[in-house]
Image (tube, helix red, strand yellow):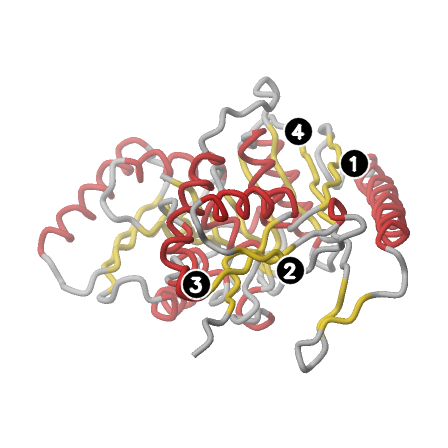
Amino acid sequence: MEDKLVTLAIRTYQRAQMIKTVLDENGIETVIHNLNLEHPELAVGVRVRIKESDLPQALKIVEEMESAWETEPANGNTETPEVLIPIDFAAQIKKVTDFGFHFANILSAEVVFLYVYFSPAFTISSNNELSTYSISDSELLRRIISLANADVENMTNLIQARIDKGELPNIPFSFELKEGVPEDQILEYCKKNNPILVVMGTHGKNLSNGLIGSVTAEVMEACVSPVFAVPELMTLESTDDIKRVAFLTNFDQKDLIAIDRVISLLSSEKLEIYFIHASEKNEPWDEVMLSGIKAYFSNHYPKVNTNYEIINKSNSPEILNDYLVKHQINVFAFNTRKRNIFARLFNPGLAYKMVLQTDIPLLVSHV
């Protein structure tokens, strides 16, 4: 039986070529699809394909490569804090902008909008056959860049007008245009520039397609910076409406740092925090730990009302969302650990699941 080809990764052309080189050196036959041979540097979102039997070895190699990329020293400007707002000029951009500017004002940071565009070199028909565009890639790319620049100019004028009217804080903002795969370019920007916060829009549970996935979910799974996700159908009108925050704790010391960040970022006169712990077993020690956390934050943050509860099932997005809705939670915050490519591919984490499950804003930090 013929060993069929499977897609190992979808990366920019430059990254795909690097992966192919290393895999070839290790005796793994690799094919790059979606590549325009006349202008390979213009191809975006190319597929790295290998034989199915080589998948375990290839995943290990790619995981090591991506870990090395992630640990490269950052070259960004560390003097001025940044709040990064990745955009695609969708309908929810006003909500994302409002929250991004609000948080930037609290954090004494400037706002950077990141727009990632790509130049499609082909379409896929219903029978999976490739059909190329009649227009040349170079001309298509020029049109895409021209449209992107026009959108940026229009948005710049709109934001400045809102600042002049007092609708947004008067803080510096700028735009970055990048060509590539959105999640790759967002993660690359965060690695180099280390923004203090990333504010992104997401379609939420009713508008997301689990088969397609979500750029926001992918960023949450791997980003070095905290990510605040703004669902399109959320009920919050502004940050002033944030009164109840749920924090999912695993009794890790780093939770204390993340909770402090939550309180500083979402501070209000009547903030309530619900500490929740998800467990498959009802252990008496869990009650003791949660009670201790509540007492600690009651002493250090006397103006914050605290509650705690144990949910008797771990890592269930449906049960967590039911809890959030029942208690009228405005923001759900939790820590997540960076996971390797194999884990992200075959076992999506809680951040990914919650993006597709809830219409409540998420604040996710990495530990």
Q: CA distance from mark 2 to mark 3?
A: 29 Å
Residue at the disc numbered 3? 353
Task: Tell me whether circle 3 and circle 4 mark residues in contact (CB < 8 Å).
Answer: no
Q: CA distance from mark 1 to mark 4?
A: 14 Å
> Measured from the top left, where is residue 126 in percent x and y?
69, 81
Q: Which one is nearer the viewer's eye here, 344 or 196?
A: 344
User: Which circle, 3 or 4, is nearer the viewer?
Assistant: 3
Residue at the disc numbered 1? 163
User: Which circle, 4 or 2, is nearer the viewer?
Assistant: 2
Q: Residue at x 71, y 72 (%)?
A: 124
Mark found first going from the N terminus, 3 or 4: 4
Q: Amino acid at mark 2?
A: His
Mark found first going from the N terminus, 2 or 3: 2
Q: Amino acid at mark 3?
A: Lys
Q: CA distance from mark 4 to mark 2?
A: 39 Å
Q: Which one is nearer the viewer's eye here, 331 or 267?
A: 331
User: Which circle, 2 or 1, is nearer the viewer?
Assistant: 2
Residue at the disc numbered 4? 110
10 Å crowding of disc 3: few (<14), some (14-19), many (20+): some
User: Which circle, 2 or 3, is nearer the viewer?
Assistant: 2
User: Which circle, 1 or 4, is nearer the viewer?
Assistant: 4
Q: Which mark is residue 33?
A: 2
Q: Amino acid at mark 4?
A: Glu
> Measured from the top left, where is residue 73 in percent x and y?
50, 24
Mark found first going from the N terminus, 1 or 3: 1
Q: CA distance from mark 1 to mark 3?
A: 36 Å
10 Å crowding of disc 1: few (<14), some (14-19), many (20+): some
Mark found first going from the N terminus, 1 or 4: 4
User: Which circle, 1 or 3, is nearer the viewer?
Assistant: 3
